[in-house]
Amino acid sequence: MSDVSLWADVALAVLGGAVRVGTPFLFVSLGECLTEKSGRINLGLEGVLVLSAMAAFGGAYWSGSAWVGVGVGALVGAALALLHGLLCSLPRVNDIATGIALMLLGAGLAFYLGKPLIQPQAPQIPSFEWGAWSDSAQVQAALRINALFPLGVVLAVAMAWAFANTRWGLIVRMAGDSSDAARALGYSVNTVRVLATTVGGAIAGIGGASLSLYYPGSWNEGLSSGQGLIAVALVIFARWRPMACLGAALLFGGAGALGPALQSVGMGWGYHLFNAMPYALTLLILVWTCSPKRALQGAPMELGVSR
């Protein structure tokens, strides 16, 4: 195999992996983007992701339908996020501490309730075979798209449009930028934030369903590998813009797919090092955004207010 052909195969594998691995990142980051736009941070998304993945797998396994599983994952994600939103609405309750507590709660519940689901196989989310026109197995694999990914793209476009052009989007942004202005216009800031957090949890729950019902397509206790926490950094990197979340999710997905792509063409050296790429990217993003001039650029102003 020539060097050109070898690297073309690697590029195709990374392209396919960017979509495959990036789909959960996309949904979780969009959910957190919506939550933070309203002025609230949800570090409990790791717990939401793990619990939703378990619930989605169980729902698909017992119902026989992957789409029922996706719906169950979204509902469970919304329920845990709703709890976070309600707790954070209480006086003198800190978003960060509550998020960490709910992250542990969600993960603990998932590990306890999901033990009977470790061995069984559940129906999988279908794929769009956009590479069927090609005789190349690499092209077909790269263009085998998770059916949830186009939904995530449409959701990113819809959120970007809604934030810029709708009354609902204006209210959410107002709650995130100036709670006093929102109250002066007669809106309940707590209600807006609870609703945004709940819907954000439902969106993140779809990402959890993608983990357990598509890639890797099974339930186990190490399924998430910190993707919920990485998504918080991803939202900062995307500067709280839904369309930028799409690009960042694909970037992180491509980074996560680099190791398997190299292994698929026989390059086994440095495999575990390349598997650490998403975490290295997260660290670089956190360092880059630590500058006082960059840290809150584009951020909802209420995120910088101590509550």
Image (cartoon, helix red, strand yellow):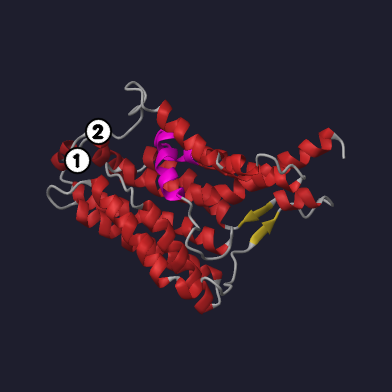
Structural distance between the alpha carbons of marks 1 and 2: 17 Å
Helix, strand or loop at disc 1?
helix
- For residue 304, the mark is 2
Position of residue 55 relative to residue 34, above or below, is below
| 226, 81: nearer the viewer | 226
Residue in the image at 65% along x and 43% along y: 271
Q: Is residue 90 left or right of residue 149?
A: left
In the figure, residue 161 lies in which quadrant?
top left
Looking at the image, tell me whether mark 1 or mark 2 is earlier in sequence order.
1
Residue at which label 1 appears:
182
Q: Is residue 32 left or right of residue 93?
A: right
Q: Is residue 198 left or right of residue 281?
A: left
Q: Nearer the viewer, mark 1 or mark 2?
A: 2
Residue 141 percent across, percent down from the top left: 73, 52
Q: Amino acid at mark 2?
A: Gly
Helix, strand or loop at disc 2?
helix
* Segment colored magenta: 226-245
Residue 69 percent across, percent down from the top left: 49, 69
Residue in the image at 46% along x and 37% along y: 282
Q: Amino acid at mark 1?
A: Ala
Q: State whether residue 59 appears in this view.
A: no
Residue in the image at 22% along x and 57% along y: 86
